[in-house]
Each structure stands twice: as C-alpha cells, then as structure tokens.
Image (cartoon, rainbow, N blue to C red):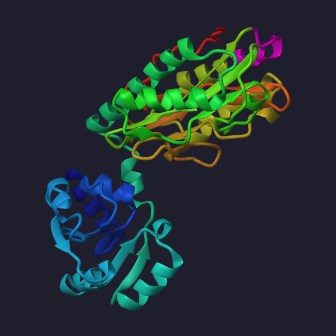
Amino acid sequence: MSRVKNIQRKLNEKQIDALLVTSSYNLEYASGFTGTTGLSVITADKALFVTDFRYTEQAAKQAVGFEIIQNTGSIYDEVAQIIKDENITKLGFEENHVTYATYQSVKELFDCTLVPVSTLIEELREIKDRDEIDLIQKAINITEAAFEHILSYIKPGMTEIKVANELDFFMREKGATGVSFDTIVASGVRSAMPHGVASDKVIEAGDMITIDFGCYYKGYVSDMTRTFALGDPGEELKKIHQIVLEANQKVTEAAKAGVTGAYLDNIARSYITEQGYGDAFGHSTGHGIGLEVHEGPGINFKNDQPLVVGNVITNEPGIYIPGLGGVRIEDDLLITEEGNLNLMKSSKELIIL
C-alpha cells in the first residue's frame, strides 16, 4: 500500500479530494490488478476498486488493501455513487486516458469538479523500487539470451520475419509473457529505417542487420538494440557502427542523477554531428522503461528535469543513411547513487558473422 500512500500524498499536495484511475498501467502500478476491466477511486484515506463480476475474485487477490466494489450497471454510475458517499468535490482524472465521449458523459454524471492530472501516477512510476528493477533485469536477461541465440541461428537466405519469430518464440520459452513491441529486424538498406519492423525481405551476405526487441516479464519490459553484420558490410557502415558505439559510450559515462534528459541527448547528438552524421540521427537518445516500453523520463531535447536515483532509461543513438543502411545500439541504464549501472552485458562491438 506504499504506492497508494504516495498517491494520497500527491493528492494532498495538489489539493484534490480523490483520483479516478482508469489507465490500465496506472491501475496495475497502484493496485497490482492485471485484468482488463476495472478502475479505482483513491481518496485521502481510502482505496476503492470497482469492477464487474468477472474480475471481483481476481481483484480481491491482486488489489490487496483495496475495497472491492462490484458494479452491476455502468461502472461510472458506481463512481458517481462513491463521489456522493465520500463527499468528493474535486476529482482528479487521467485526461490522456479518457475519450472525449467518456469525458462528456461523466461530466454530466459526476456531481463534482473534474481536474486533469495525467502525470500524477506517471511521475511516481519513473522511480523504480528494488522489486521493479529485479523484474526489468529478468526481462533483460531473457532478451540477451535471445540475442546470443540468434547470432548462431541467423543465416543468409532467411527472411527478417523468420528471424523475428525465432526471437519472439525463444523469449517466450525462457519465461517472457509477451514482446515489448513488434520486433524490429531490419537488414541491408532496410537498416536505414529506424523502426523497420521485420518484413519478408531475404537477409543476404554483406547485410548490416539491426535488431530492436524486448520482452515482458511479470509486467515489466526490456528494450535492446544491437547491429551486426552477416559478412563484411563495407567500410562506411563499419565506420558508422564505431561512431554510434562511441556516442552510446559517452552517454553511459555521463548518465547520473542530477543531469537532464536534454543534457544526455545533446552529448550523443553533438558527437554524431562532429563526426559528420548529425542529419542522419533523427530520433531522441532514449526514454524511460518500466510497465510500458516508452515512459518517463524522456532522454530528449525537451526534457529539462534532472534524472534521479531509480530511473531506468534507454541509451540508443543511431545513424541512418537511406540507400546504404543504418546502425543503432541500445542499452538499458539504471540511475544509481554512484552514477549508473548498465543492466545489459551483451557485446556492443561490431560482430561480423
């Protein structure tokens, strides 16, 4: 219930009577509930969980410390009753997770002021506790094992989809509950596409291959990218790989509590620009991971908030040359009291198979 207490503290700071939690990720964070139907109302001194008959038993087991309420009619009718019973006059709601149609209907139904507070739980989620870090590490271990496996599996003549499927199945066999996102396998000139989800392209000798993938383990994700070659990819791509590797290393050296996401993004961007490839690095340097594969803090030019101990961020600079190919290298870093800990062990040097 310490997470609920942290939410209640935030409500007090914002002078809001209660929070309506509808995001499935925020529900899982606050309560432990992993079902697909339910919501929570957290007040200054209560944690209420509303769901229908299909999930009351699951909610009772997972949402420890929450009062479970079964809705028989509309779930929002039940919330309206809670608002009345608890004398709620200001209700925070997650505006990024509510459709306009739902907002219009509950605005009429709820007898209180609705206050948008979409980042309230997300900000708490940015700081991982020991249990969360352990789950992320387990997801990373599975992902790295899959990378080692694929290096001995991949051969010229295979399609990118075949390689992606092998990665996905291998991770599930090792205990993953799913993939973090659609696995990216981009070979040859397709490696110039930062998000080149696996296609039916045949992998050929001499191809540079970028694989960006990860898995879910007990609700938490990993996110890993490595770029390697199947035979000699040519001098320019080998040079680009070294530049991206050095940019990645510079970010790792600088990542610590107190520096901002914008500062780290600038380190990677400035170095790649100095080497003559600034226009070929078009995405941000990283992002937070946890219950979602993209969450705060952002490692981008817009984020001027200092990193804090417990953040888990990706470090993923890249260079992409249309018609030639591209390189991205990505690690997951834990911000610690001493600086940071790279949660990944896999080699980042250019592997030529």
Q: Nearer the viewer, residue 313 or 200?
A: 200
Q: Measured along the vertical axis of the image, is residue 289 above or below residue 76?
A: above
- x and y, in percent, of residue 315 in the image: 56, 31
User: Which residue is painted at 23% across and 66% down in the image?
Assistant: 54
User: Which residue is painted at 31% across and 38% down in the image?
Assistant: 132
User: Which residue is painted at 32% across and 62% down in the image?
Assistant: 10
Indicate left or right for 173 with 295 as reference. Answer: left
Q: Measured along the vertical axis of the image, is residue 102 above or below residue 142?
A: below
Observer able to see residue 261: yes
Quadrant where the image shows the N terminus: bottom left
- x and y, in percent, of residue 253 in the image: 54, 21
Observer able to see residue 308: no
Indicate left or right for 310 with 235 as reference. Answer: left
- x and y, in percent, of residue 218 in the image: 31, 40
Quarter assignment of residue 39: bottom left
In the image, is residue 235 part of the stretch drawn in magenta? yes
User: Which residue is painted at 25% across and 81% down in the image?
Assistant: 78
Count of numbered labels shown in the rendering: 0
Quadrant where the image shows the C terminus: top right
Magenta stretch secondary structure, dominant: helix
Q: Measured along the vertical axis of the image, is residue 31 above or below residue 180?
A: below
The magenta region covers 232-242
